[in-house]
Image (cartoon, rainbow, N blue to C red):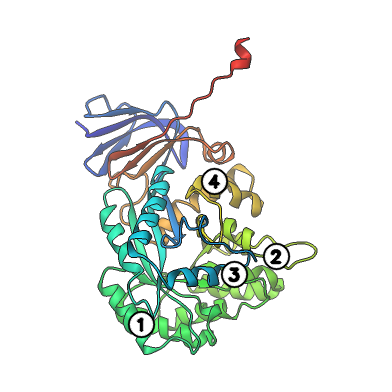
Amino acid sequence: MYSLLIKNARLFGNESQQQDIGINGDSIVKIGQGLGSEADKIIDAQGKLIIPGFVDIHTHLEKSMTSHILKNESGTLMGAIVSMNDFFAKYDPEDIYHRARQAAELAISQGTTAIRTHITIDRNVGLGIIRPILKLKEDLKDVLTIQVIAFPSSHKGGIQESDLDVLRQAISEGADLLGGCPHLEEEHKHFTDHIFHLAKELDVDLDLHVDESDEPNVDALEYVAEKTIEMGYQGRVNAGHCTALSAVPKAVADRVIGKVRDAGMTITTLPSCNLYLMGRHDEVLQRRGITRVREFLKAGVKVCFASDNVRDPFRPFGNHDLLEEALLTAQLVQMGTDKELETVLEMGTYNPAQAMKLPKYGLEKGCYADLVILDAVSAPEAIVKQSTKEWIIKRGRVVVRNTRTMEEVWKQV
């Protein structure tokens, strides 16, 4: 007897045959053919693809849903930062919570079952911005796993002891890990040294914005990789963006990619946001604004993609839809074969789940039943045709049922 039984599903990575998935409580307890019909609830997948829930490893929930009130006329990264900083100078905690919840609910409806968000910590506002997000984390814990990054703003004069104290307090109140933007600091090594030592003191992982620039300068990424090894933090550091890596010669890129590999780092590319922000001053051969995804993968580095900014001054678009992001990523990095498209889907599921150290994630007995049934029979089909996420299941409970209908009236004439 199962609490939920999914019949006739094609499991991502093993689509050749249809199988049943037996779920009891929050976990998968059996996978096989012909598991019977004794269950509180049965879903007939009808030969469609089932994947573990999407994992959105890089977002900014506190900034989401502000594009209708905040403008970035320059369209640049710095223009967006200035607009957002002005807004946060007079923030409203209830507004932050409301907009973040709206964004999180949108992500849930699109099949995301876990999300990591960078939340601004500022020496002037203290924890006022992050606390509404920590409340949201608790309020939505049954339907969405949220990891919160204490994300310190850059200040003239560099990071101070007072900033570190605020970060310590954020972790003590429920933030999960530390972040920051080394390349935007006056002295990137000074910031990197301090944030690594604080992370080690608090025993938390790091997720950093690194070299989000068109300029051919990857010093920050190279130093982060070196510091990761020095501090014994292999497997505990994620670097997002790394767009400057595409602006340097291949020999330089290869050297830095090798250090990233040796450091056991994960890389997160944010194609939709960087495509919108980067390359605005290029007069010819406008750059795509993404890092060297294919080179990282070839070197054996785990790569993820994520939503980043959604409907805010950094990017006035987005639906917190990782299947949408998968299609854009595949096109921008020119990964179009069946095998490559399967790799792309892993970049929005298994790879970020591993980087976030999500327990019991996957499609095996004993894993949490965090699942999405797609109206497709394979990963390539799901990405290319942007399949409906028909069933979204969190911890063994159906949380969303999506349908898409179409009536071809012209064929009836």
- The image quarter containing residue 56 is bottom left
SS of the residue under disc 3 = helix
Instruction: State the image coordinates of residue 331 (x, y, percent, origin top left).
Output: 64, 49
From the image, state whether disc 2 or disc 1 is nearer to you: 2
Front residue of 361 and 120: 120
Of mark 2 and mark 1, the one earlier in the sequence is 1
Instruction: Pick out the residue farthest to the right.
Output: 284
Marks 3 and 1, how far apart at CA: 30 Å
Three-letter residue code for mark 3: Gly
From the image, state whether disc 2 or disc 3 is nearer to you: 3
Mark 2 or mark 3, which has the lower sequence index?
Answer: 3
**Callout 4: 10 Å neighbours few (<14), some, many (20+)?**
some
Q: Which mark is residue 198?
A: 1
Q: Which residue is mark 3?
A: 79
Rendered residue at 49%/25% (across/down): 405
User: Nearer the viewer's eye, disc 1 or disc 4?
Assistant: 4
Looking at the image, is mark 2 or mark 4 nearer the viewer?
2
What's the CA distance linking mark 1 and mark 4?
Answer: 36 Å
Q: Are marks 3 and 4 in contact (CB under 8 Å)?
A: no
> For mark 4, what is the residue?
324
User: Which element carries disc 1, helix, strand or loop?
Assistant: helix
Mark closer to the observer (3, 1): 3
Which residue type carries mark 2? Arg
| Residues at discs 2 and 4 in contact (Cβ within 8 Å) | no
Q: What SS does tag 4 mark?
A: helix
Q: Residues within 10 Å of mark 2 (few under 14, many from 20)?
A: some
Q: Residues within 10 Å of mark 3 (few under 14, many from 20)?
A: some
Q: Position of residue 343 (x, y in %)?
A: 54, 50
The type of residue carrying mark 4 is: Glu
On-image quarter of the N terminus = top left
| Side (left or right) of 361 relative to 333 | left
